Image: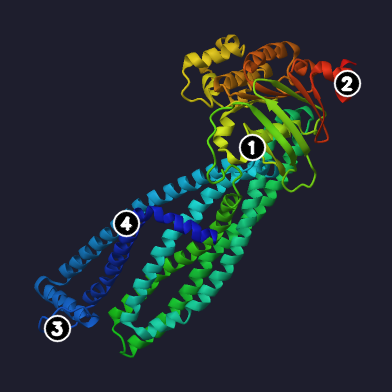
Amino acid sequence: MDDLKHFIRSLFRYKGFIGLNLFFNVLYVFTSAFSITLIAPFVSVLFGMVPSVEAEPDFGWNTDAILQWAYYHIGQFQLRHGTMDALLLLSAAFMAATLLSNTFRYLSLFFLCNVRSGILRDLRTSFYRHMMLLPVGYFSEKRKGDLLSRINSDVGEVEWAVVRSLQGAFMEPLFVLVFVAGLFVISWQLSLAVFFSLPLVMYVAGKVGASLKRKSDKVQGMLGKMVASVEEAINGLRIIKSFNLIEMVEKEFDKRNQRYVKELNAVLRRRDLSGPLTEIMLISVTLGVMLFGGLKVVQGGMNADMFVLFVLLLIKTISPAKHAVTAFYDIQKGRAALERVYAVFHEPAGDSDRPGALEKKSFDSSILYDDVCFSYPGSDKLVLDKVGLKMEKGKTYAFVGPSGAGKTTIADLLSRFYDPSSGRILLDGTDLRDLKREDLRALVGTVGQFPFLWHDTVAENIRFGKEDAGREEVEAAARKANAHEFIMALPQGYDTNLGDNGMTLSGGQRQRIVIARAILKNAPILVLDEATSALDTQSEALVQDALSKLMQGRTSIVIAHRISTVRNADCIVVFDHGRIVEQGTHKELMEKNGVYAQYVNLQAL
């Protein structure tokens, strides 16, 4: 389905506000048209051209009857009160009609606000929700800055170019329709002359609009890349400065910025051309009509007041016609942004459960990897090759091996960040793919090499994942993680804001807060992925002690390179090139004198 059609359908959840907007728009258009028609009797009174109507005519719903009725009463009022009073009366009526029409206009925009803000909220919420459901692999292929540009800049462009333009796309054509109907009532010959010229205007509008959409699509893509480069520069600021790369990075950003500005200028110039170009063409049509109509007045084929009213209606038609064309351009420009937003929606969600997925609230016996093979999406290279492994409840399993051997991938499959390419993983005898992801992930706690902390207080970072935890539980978890002492030394203790990813803390302190979070979650299965590899000796000792407390009574998977970290595990599993080459206790593997023994000896050296 076309993205624009899908977007317009989504507007119907606001049909109440849209209905009120349309209702007041219609009132605005008709009261505006009525106020313009008062110009004709004003001109007639001013120049003494009010037709003489001897007897009061019957009122009827046709043009002649309305004009005869109006001119009779205007003439009678002028005879009794004089010309000046008649002009004042018509001016007051014109002013009242104008005030009324603009009140209706404000009310139409008043109710449109709910639609504009609501649809933006829904679009951003849907984008964020779907983004959270995308597979982890999607974010390794896409730049985060580009996604940020889509949820911020592109969604804003949709509000400006599409939602606001839809208002103009309805109201302005309605204006044109009503005023054109008035033109035909006054003179169908002059009106036909106008309509014969409109196909040229619409053809030019279509050509410019199509090219505008192509250009806008390119500009939005360039903006996404530029935002991505800013995000990368912020993340790598330490490296950039330490390698004296500031000037190089600035030059690269300046090149991107210059290209973006060049393309943006092309879009803006093309869009800005639409208004003047349309107005020139419409004014040319108006001048032709004025010459033709003036000739009819001179020859007596048309009353002067009706000709003045015709010209005023025609001029009044130019502005909404121009705005309608501009709205068409803006919608074309906004479609490019809308397509970028919907491109994320079209990505299949990786976190959707199978129909009838089973609930799983406990871990009871074992985890079994049964001939598991895995390749990353879009790659033919096997990361895991027929892995068979059984892990029993309550034991500690250590995964060792060179980088890229598949150790972390094993843990990622357990949390269903990915699914096996072939084979299966069973939890208590049930395939993970038959379980609800939310239940499965509640059973697994993870402490990684690079701790992630929110821009929030210490207490909220520990409480993350268990929102109902009280302060006593938070502090108890922090004490077990050997974190309570340094937390209390912070300026506001547990209420201290940690800043962006806890950069005010040391690596060991950040890691202990993450461990406290895992202790509070109290998951029966624990994954420790290089949890101490980036720490100094003193910090490692504190963290290792906290991890020992965390692992008590749990089934633990320890991924590490340091032998000191894994030698006490119940089972050490050695990986190489995606395969399990050895497994057993430290003592058994050393006696075997195989790959693990060589690994230990290399570390000893």
Image quadrant holding the N terminus, namely bottom right
Query: Horizontal and vertical percent for residue 122?
Result: 46, 47
- As measured in the structure, the alpha-carbon distance from the residue carrying label 2 to the one carrying label 1 is 34 Å
Nearer the observer, disc 4 or disc 3? 4
Label annotation for residue 592? 2
> What amino acid is found at the position of numbered circle 3 in the picture?
Val
**Pointer 2: residues within 10 angstroms few (<14), some, or many (20+)?**
few
Task: Decide which of tag 4 and tag 2 comes sooner along the chain.
Answer: 4
Query: Horizontal and vertical percent for residue 483?
Result: 60, 13
Task: Decide which of tag 2 and tag 1 comes sooner along the chain.
Answer: 1
Q: Seen in the image, is 430 located left or right of residue 390?
A: left
Q: Quadrant of residue 127?
A: top right
Nearer the observer, disc 2 or disc 3? 2
Q: Determine whether label 2 and label 3 are within 8 Å by CB.
A: no
Task: Decide which of tag 2 and tag 3 comes sooner along the chain.
Answer: 3
**Pointer 3: residues within 10 angstroms few (<14), some, or many (20+)?**
some
Q: Which residue is mark 4?
A: 20
Q: Determine whether label 1 and label 3 are within 8 Å by CB.
A: no
Q: Which residue is mark 3?
A: 53
- Circle 2: element type: helix
Q: Residue at x 58, y 55 (%)?
A: 339
Nearer the observer, disc 1 or disc 4? 1
Label annotation for residue 416? 1
Task: Decide which of tag 4 and tag 3 comes sooner along the chain.
Answer: 4
- As measured in the structure, the alpha-carbon distance from the residue carrying label 1 to the one carrying label 3 is 88 Å
Query: Horizontal and vertical percent for residue 94?
Result: 24, 65
Tell which of 526 and 233 is nearer to you. Answer: 526
> What amino acid is found at the position of numbered circle 4 in the picture?
Leu
